[in-house]
Amino acid sequence: MKLRRAVQLLFLALFAVLIALTTFPLKAKLPVDLFLRLDPLLLIGASIAARTVISGLFAAVVMLALTALLGRFFCGWICPLGTTIELTDDLLYKRRKRRWPNAQRVGRGLKYINLIIILVAAAFGYGLTFLLDPIALFTRAATYLLHPAAMLLANTGLDVLRPVALKADWVKLYYAELHQPLFSSGSLAAAIIFITILMLNRLQRRFWCRSLCPLGALLGLFARLSPVRRQVGATCDHDGKCKRTCETGAIFDDEIQYDPAECILCWNCVDDCHLNVTAFRFASPLPQLRQPLDVGRRRFLVGLAGGAFGALLFRSNPARAARPDKLLRPPAALPEDDFLKRCIRCGQCVKACPTNTLQPDWGEGGLEGLWAPRHQMRLAGCDQGCNVCGQVCPTGALRDVPLYQKRYAKIGTAIIDQQRCVVWAADKFCLVCDEACPYNAIYFAENEQGKRRPYVDRRHCNGCGLCESVCPVDGQGAINVYPDEQIRLAQGDYADEARRRGFLFERGVAEDKILSTGDGGEAYGD
Amino acid sequence: MDVTRRQMLKMIAATGVVVAAPSLTDIAMAAADPRVVAFKGEQAATVRKIVERLGGIGKFISKGDKVVIKPNMGFATAPLRSSNTDTVVIRTLAELALEAGAKQVQVLDNPVHPAPLCKVRSGIVEALAGLDDVFVQWVKNEKFFGDVVIPNGRQLKRTQVMKAILECDALINAPMAKSHGGAIVSMGLKNWMGAVKNRQEWHSTFNMHQAIADFGTYIYNEKRLKFTILDATRVLATGGPGGPGEVRHLQTIIGGFDPVAIDSFGLSLSSWNGKNYKPHQIPYLKIAEEMGLGSSDLSNLRSA
């Protein structure tokens, strides 16, 4: 159906535009996390895990209500992953023989198992939702893989043009560069899941949507209530075309009956009906509510056990008790336990981060911290004029606090390794960390031998990591940020808390290293 | 001739000064071949006056030349904080290059602070606005740097220098005078640290003072390097290189060809972090003089 494809492309384009706009400074009029905010599975999963209703996602109840009214239209018309699956299918698999015929019902119940696993794990206090929620995983693939790849392509193009620009004296083009994000190998795992989902079409068209998607399962449960019903006239000649072209194989063998929990309202059956006897009309949902769900007692128990086991597996993490040295969360991240329960690993903070210091965690925090944002200070420090990570977080795992508060949300403390520092160990003329520090927390003083040596004044260090990023020593820096004295608050004022503990991070000391106009468009200078 | 700082500043203010080569005792000859020229006054007029005394811009830049100006603009600080070369000085040099017929002028530095911040906060983009064919760039990516061998370097034997510098027809060194936590003072010789890609290794791998002098043996032997304009309009007497620190309004500009003499002259204009220094107390000046880059002897001081 042409109209449906147009609507799908429109939403896919909107999804891409919102990802592109997830950047610093944040200028978008729409919330850049719109699709995540409309995802009821994220709302339910993360809310149960965090034991509180996550207000940022509350709009998703609208999606549940609309699904109860209209059916799984989200899957067929809006879901950017669904659209991408269809487009990939048209491109790669349309003419190939599938593993199973379109109408064969294979593993339909798996998606309910996935849903139960997520809900049970959430009840055990672990937000496993991020792993298989289609919007979270697609956003993650876009932020961790597709966007960096697009930038690499564009920059390669610019490199090709560079010699031409040089010859033609187009100086601006010669120097043109796009910010190229670099990500740790965790992005590869996110990419593999995404690509696998696309390749599952080899089995059946939209195999992910039919058999695996937990959001599809949740919406399917509500779609059973919908009074919008497929009806077939008595003159149907049973040529079987609707059965073959249904996007999700929702039509039963008799071609009259269908499963409303599976139907995504693609209306292929309406378009392809050569007798024009198929239509969607209002009717009572009651008769079909009596149809059994694709989930029996055995599957329910599997889901239950899987959820409990999943929660145990992901939560049995020594990092909880023995925090790794370099596991630094973004400023204004909730206390670690709350943070991990809420974070849906969408990667929006990582995408928006202007310095690239935020990286998807891959191993540091154990399975539990998989893909959650962490600082890689050696790569880049945290810009002190930016608070975009909190602004784009859909779940409040990172608090959206004003710039001033963010500076007081102390990430950690920089500590000089005197064995590695070239001034301490080799008497070199280095002052690079001091040059970079935005709060003059690094100072030079004479040591016991009367030599000028760098020290950190912990009262003025908020752990921004600019020093670590510029330290000229090879390998690990000679000045490193550790989580010592980090300030993580579930609520309340960071500046008050920091001052109470004797910290002072005031610009004006060296505001030159603080970028621009994070909140309120303030511009400060001399 | 031994002069105090007070006398020197008075002289610059009254008539400007010239430092001639030690053998040139005749005032007329000294004026014709100055190692250092210094004047006090409004920046644009003073830069023009100095370039005239150095031989006129037409002596250095021909029609159709590609010109690179290398100021010290590595800090994302507002102009009055004085961690960067004065914006009027930079603009005047660009204007002079255009007047001499330059096809294109690039104003370049490899900054200490992030490039986007320097662009927003240094005021240099605004200062150069309206000058066609003048481009200001903060350059960090290694694709814009090319390999250079330094045969006379003692420690720094090879490095990567901005390709635009390697390929230009005329290069102008446009540093400012400021205190420096690692090098004591930063002026003309130290300014070249912002022309190379790997500035970190000057701190970590080499003796920085030796590396500064080593690079000098390369760049001051390049024919395309035409002259130095050392900006002492507002010197950052303490807290350098980034500041904030004490800003002294000397309103003085120094020009010339001899890197050791220029920096020695600049050194004499102020105390630095509260101490007074002689040229031989600045290790890189001492090494540079030993390596034959120039002379710190300022005894042939004349009224200009």
Image (cartoon, rainbow, N blue to C red):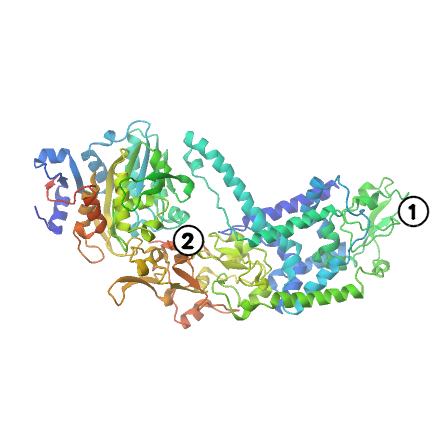
Tell me which amino acid carries mark 1. Answer: Ala
Looking at the image, residue B291 lies above or below residue B275:
above
Q: Is residue A329 left or right of residue B138?
A: right
Q: Quadrant of residue A383?
A: bottom left
Which one is nearer the viewer's eye here, A447 or B59?
A447
- Give the number of the disc on residue A216: none
- Give the number of the disc on residue A515: 2
Query: Residue A215 location, x and y as percent?
Result: 70, 57
Write the residue at 56% across / 47% down: A147
Q: Quadrant of residue B134?
A: top left
Q: Of callouts 2 and 1, which one flags the residue occurring earlier in the amino acid sequence?
A: 1
Q: Is residue A416 left or right of residue A368?
A: left
Tell me which amino acid carries mark 2. Answer: Leu
Please tell me how crowded label 2 is: few (under 14), some (14-19), or many (20+) other residues with Cα within 10 Å: many
Q: State the residue position of label 1.
A: A234
Please tell me how crowded label 1 is: few (under 14), some (14-19), or many (20+) other residues with Cα within 10 Å: few
Does the rendering let one see residue A500? yes
Looking at the image, residue B15 lies above or below residue A290:
above
Which one is nearer the viewer's eye here, A186 or A170?
A186
Tag 1 subunit: A
Query: Residue B141 location, x and y as percent?
Result: 42, 43
Judged from the image, the secondary structure of the residue bearing numbered disc 1 is loop
Write the residue at 23% across / 57% down: B273
> Mark 2 and mark 1: span between their CA atoms?
70 Å
For the image, the number of numbered tags is: 2
Q: Mark 2 vs mark 1: tell me if same chain.
A: yes
Does the rendering let one see residue B72? no
Write the residue at 35% across / 46% down: B123
Q: Quadrant of residue A495?
A: bottom left
Q: Is residue B55 left or right of residue B114?
A: left
> Which quadrant: the C terminus of chain A?
bottom left
Query: Residue A75 location, x and y as percent?
Result: 71, 51
